[in-house]
Image: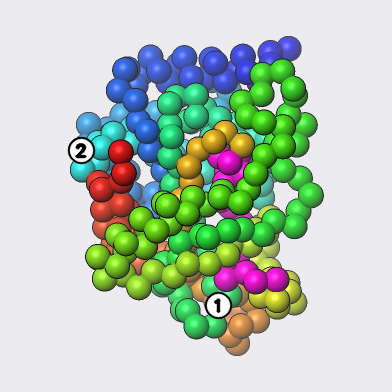
């Protein structure tokens, strides 16, 4: 049986051969509605996940499942077009795998984007939010069961700067220059695929959550373990269950993320272009 370390080395060797020597130091994981961001890149190379040895394959709608590299505003970046969710049946450990690959490819910064429910009554659907911190009450971690040999980070690791304070400040500055009234708050993870119950939303609000969603947290935990500096951005697509009279509808989520797409894309472009070196 191959160890995970050996599998990772094979994934990385395959990608390094295609990517060549140009190393991207920023990786972006594109959430619902942002999949087309890849079209902003030039000199693009696209590799379907299914061609990368040991890489998982994504199934969620709007998640095409390709690794892209290319240039954006003079910066060479990698995008994961399509991500892996626990609700698709992937284990937490499988969700961690691509993040480990990115680290071994030489990535230093990770930008995680998602669509999320809004729990803060002062905000509204269509708002963008910088993630300041997260809450995960589920037992399993993407690092559960990690073997001691072949570790890529410490067994026990700190989460107090998992959403890098300097990067958050930088993200707020860029937003303000673009006249985007960006919010900042706590994202609470739910595994889905059901949207939350109104009682769960009330509980999350009591705990201090400003947003809820079904992604990002497994990746952010893995990134903290690997020492990647992380920025998380949410597109708030709907108010949490029970906060309005309307039932939560997946189509509304997609519709709002489509409405915000141009603003979000322009913002991301500026973020990457001026990203600290
Ligand atoms: N809950 C969980 N995930 C989501 C939501 C929500 O209300 N909206 C978009 N993703």
Residue 256 is at least partly visible in this image = no
Mark number, residue 105: none
Residue 215 magenta-drawn?
yes
Which element is circle 1 on?
loop
The relative height of residue 112 versus residue 103 in the rendered view (above or below) is below
Does label 2 or label 1 sit earlier along the sequence?
2
Q: Answer with left or right where residue 225 lies relative to residue 173.
A: right
The image position of residue 37, as x and y in percent, is 33, 49
In the depicted view, which residue is nearer to us: 234 or 223? 223
The relative height of residue 28 versus residue 54 in the rendered view (above or below) is below
Residue range in magenta is: 207-224
User: What residue sits 63% from the left and 29% below the top?
Assistant: 153
Mark number, residue 74: 2
Q: Quadrant of the N terminus?
A: top right
Which residue in the structure is indicated by mark 1? 120
Ligand 1 near label 2 (Cβ, under 8 Å)? Answer: no
């Amino acid at each position: 049986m191959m160890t995970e370390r050996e599998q990772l080395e094979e994934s990385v060797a395959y990608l390094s051969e295609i990517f060549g020597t140009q190393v991207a130091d920023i990786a972006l994981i594109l959430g619902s509605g942002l999949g087309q961001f890849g079209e902003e890149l030039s000199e693009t190379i696209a590799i379907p996940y299914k061609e990368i040895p040991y890489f998982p394959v994504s199934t969620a709608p709007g998640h095409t499942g390709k690794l892209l590299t290319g240039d954006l505003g003079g910066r060479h970046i990698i995008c994961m077009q399509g991500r892996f969710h626990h609700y698709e049946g992937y284990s937490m450990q499988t969700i961690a795998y691509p993040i480990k690959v990115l680290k071994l490819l030489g990535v230093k910064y990770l930008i995680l984007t998602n669509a999320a429910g809004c729990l803060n009554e002062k905000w509204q659907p269509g708002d963008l939010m910088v993630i300041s911190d997260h809450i995960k009450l589920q037992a399993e971690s993407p690092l559960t069961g990690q073997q001691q040999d072949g570790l890529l980070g410490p067994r026990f690791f700190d989460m107090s700067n998992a959403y890098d304070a300097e990067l958050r400040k930088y993200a707020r500055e860029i937003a303000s220059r673009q006249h985007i009234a960006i919010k900042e708050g706590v994202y609470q993870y739910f595994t889905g695929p059901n949207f939350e119950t109104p009682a769960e939303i009330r509980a999350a609000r009591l705990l201090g959550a400003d947003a809820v969603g079904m992604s990002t947290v497994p990746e952010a935990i893995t990134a903290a373990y690997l020492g990647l500096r992380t920025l998380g951005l949410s597109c708030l697509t709907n108010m949490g269950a029970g906060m309005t009279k309307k039932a939560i509808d997946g189509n509304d989520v997609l519709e709002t993320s489509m409405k915000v797409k141009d603003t979000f894309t322009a913002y991301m472009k500026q973020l990457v272009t001026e990203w600290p070196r």
